[in-house]
Amino acid sequence: MSMTFTKRLERTGRRLREITASRLAGGPPCGTCGFSGHPLHRDVLWPELIAEWELTPQWARWMNEREGSRCAWCGSSLRSGRLAGAIVAAVNAGAHTSATHLSALFRDRRARALSIAEINSAGNLHRYLARCPGLRHSEYGSRAPGVPSEDLMRLSYPDRCFDLVVTSDTLEHVPDIHIALREIHRVLKPGGAHVYSVPVVSDRPTRRRAELNNGTLTHLLPPSFHGAPQQGKLDFLVFHEFGADFESICTAAGFDMTLRRDPQNPALVTFIGRRRG
């Protein structure tokens, strides 16, 4: 028996044990795949990020749960699973579909008829969104064939062209949140929805970490990057730490807001903003 086959067999056995234990422990269904089980968990925040964001131990625990807890079946983080559930809820309300999770949504021809913008890949949700023929997927700074680059402050799309816009922990990296929200509002059809996640520390106001004016970057607080420790890429730079006033910022951009909150974890909140008229 080869070493490669043995390792593959060990991985398969470990995965089966994890899935079985998760199922037996019980839990709500995953919004991505529908699997019901207790999430697997490992802490993913690193000390420098916790210090930069001045997170209390409680908020660090909540954020670690948001990012580090995952579905045993499909691997979606809790954040991604909640985002998937919010996408399903928004489409069900707008297109009169009745899906219970994202992996089943585009079996319905009414969902497949939608025009969707996924602005930067929403993690492992992308493979399910890609089942919609009307998906327009972009990545900021992309040079990959067939994947255009889109800047949230200067979208190339015409007015009122999308039923749904999806962003996943992207808005905190945009230099001007007000321009970005107005651009998303502009490209949505009347009644269309922006469904998104963004990290929010809800017991304090929003604060700016950096500004970009006429090409000049100014740091107002020590630079903070998402992605991974030591991965100092400009496109991962955090411009905003959103806080308790974030909902009012979105409302001011012309959206009717619905917040899907977790009763035990205030860091687990997903946003649905519908364009008014």
Image: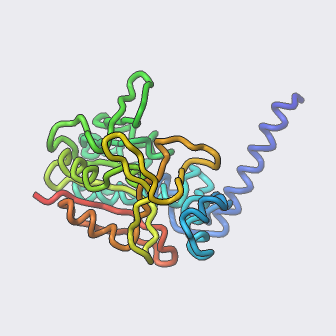
Please name whichever residue, 202 or 232, is drawn nearer the observer in this view of the structure. Answer: 232
Residue 180 appears in the picture as rendered? yes
Horizontal side, residue 258 vs residue 123: left or right: left
Report the residue that reaches farthest toward the left: 277
Q: Where is residue 88 in the image (x, y as percent from the top left)?
A: 35, 55
Location of the C terminus (image quadrant): bottom left
- Say if 15 sits above or below 249 in the image: above
- Say if 181 sits above or below 114 in the image: below
Q: Where is residue 251 in the image (x, y as percent from the top left)?
A: 23, 66
Horizontal side, residue 151 vs residue 95: left or right: right
Q: Where is residue 239 in the image (x, y as percent from the top left)?
A: 42, 54
Report the residue that reaches farthest toward the top: 145
The image quadrant that residue 244 belongs to is bottom left
Residue drawn at point x = 28 percent, y = 54 percent: 194
Please name whichever residue, 238 or 119, is drawn nearer the observer in this view of the structure. Answer: 238
Report the residue that reaches farthest toward the right: 1
Residue drawn at point x = 52 percent, y = 53 percent: 223
Residue drawn at point x = 26 percent, y = 40 percent: 154
Residue 84 appears in the picture as rendered? no
The image quadrant that residue 37 belongs to is bottom right
- Colour approach in the figure: rainbow
Location of the N terminus (image quadrant): top right
Q: Where is residue 219 in the image (x, y as percent from the top left)?
A: 46, 53
- Say if 37 sits above or below 215 in the image: below
Residue drawn at point x = 23 percent, y = 56 percent: 96
Please name whichever residue, 4 or 261, is drawn nearer the observer in this view of the structure. Answer: 261
